[in-house]
Amino acid sequence: MSHLKRQAIPKKWPIPRKGTKYLVKSASHERQGIPLLIVIRDILKIAKTRKEVKKALHAKSILVNGRVSKDDKHGLTLFDKISIIPAKKNYEVILT
């Protein structure tokens, strides 16, 4: 399965419990974390839709830990760095 119900997400994810019914799940089994799509769209509010996020990823304008990531399901864990090249902004994943 490539999705989670919003009610079943971990409580550590800083997104609201109500909203759309399904959310994307991180793709790799060894990197359990918040998917890149959720971070860019729902937490940072840089993009409004998944289509905008995928367009930015394929344009190579978003880097994860200094590398180009083309997968919107890439799991971000603690202290991963996200760089948005056109806006010249850098973010770091930290749980508070």
Image (cartoon, rainbow, N blue to C red):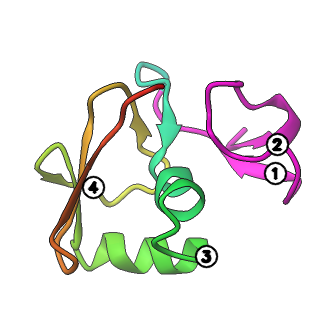
Q: For the residues carrying marks 2 and 1, which lies nearer the camera in this image?
A: 2
Q: Position of residue 19 (x, y in %)?
A: 86, 58
Which element type, helix, strand or loop, lies under badge 2? helix
Rendered residue at 42%/19% (across/down): 30
Q: Cα distance, mark 4 to mark 3?
A: 18 Å
Q: Amino acid type of disc 3? A: Thr
Q: Can you identify the residue that label 4 sits on?
A: 69
Q: How crowded is mark 2: few (under 14 residues within 10 Å), some or many (20 or more)?
A: some
Can you tell which quarter of the image residue 68 is in? bottom left
Q: Distance between the residues labelled 1 and 3?
A: 14 Å
Q: What residue type is labelled 2?
A: Arg
The stretch in magenta equals 1-28
Residue type at mark 1?
Tyr
- Residue at the disc numbered 1: 22
Q: Earlier in the sequence, mark 4 or mark 2?
A: 2
Q: Of the numbered discs in the image, which one, if any, rests on residue 49? A: 3
Asked if disc 3 and disc 2 are in contact, CB closer than 8 Å, the reply is no
